[in-house]
């Protein structure tokens, strides 16, 4: 899935999968250029063809959103019952 996203979604800035070696769980960390890039990802080849296969053997147990998202995106995400965190301050090197 990562290769398909990288090849077809230029506004997906970061797409990281972390697996726990001791438990059957994975954390997926995604960063998008803007809210429209999230819609492009949701409608993209990977999400439409590969994600259904992943969801046939897994489920989302926690969904967090960091940063400012559009009202349209917030409405779409309500089905995931996300925890939404708005940026207060930051420092990045």
Image: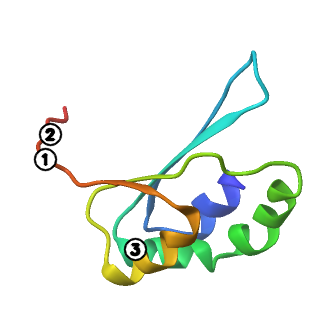
Local crowd size for mark 2, using a 10 Å CA cut-off: few (<14), some (14–19), many (≥20): few
Q: Which callout, 2 or 1, points to the residue nearer the camera?
A: 1
In the displayed orientation, state which residue is furthest to the bottom. 72
Q: In this view, does 31 lie above or below 75?
A: above
Position of residue 89 relative to residue 5, above or below, is above
User: Which residue, given by chain and number where applicable, does mark 1 sit on?
Assistant: 88
Give the mark toward the camera: 2 or 3: 3
Q: In which quarter of the image is the N terminus?
A: bottom right
Q: Which quadrant of the rendered structure holds the C terminus?
A: top left
Q: Is residue 33 left or right of residue 39?
A: left
Label 1 Cα neighbours within 10 Å, binned few <14 / some 14-19 / many ≥20: few
Point out the residue furthest to the top here.
22
Res 65 label: none
- Tell me: residue 85, above or below residue 34: above
Q: Which circle's residue, 3 or 1, is located before the other in the chain?
A: 3
Question: Which residue is depicted at the point 64% across and 76% down?
Answer: 44
Residue at point 74% right, 18% down? 21
Compared across the picture, whether 29 is left or right of 44 comes to left
Reading the image, the residue beneath label 2 is: 90
66 to 19, vertically: above or below: below
The foreground one among 79 and 2 is: 79
Q: Please name the residue that numbered disc 3 is placed on.
A: 74
Label 1 element class: loop
């Amino acid at each position: 899935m990562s290769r398909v996203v990288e090849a077809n979604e230029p506004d997906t800035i970061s797409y990281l999968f972390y697996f726990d070696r001791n438990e059957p769980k994975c954390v997926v960390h995604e960063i998008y250029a803007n809210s429209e890039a999230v819609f492009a990802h949701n409608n993209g080849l990977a999400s439409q063809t590969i994600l259904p296969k992943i969801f046939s053997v897994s489920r989302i147990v926690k969904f967090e959103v960091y940063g400012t998202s559009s009202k349209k995106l917030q409405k779409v995400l309500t089905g995931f019952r996300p925890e939404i965190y708005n940026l207060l301050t930051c420092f990045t090197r």
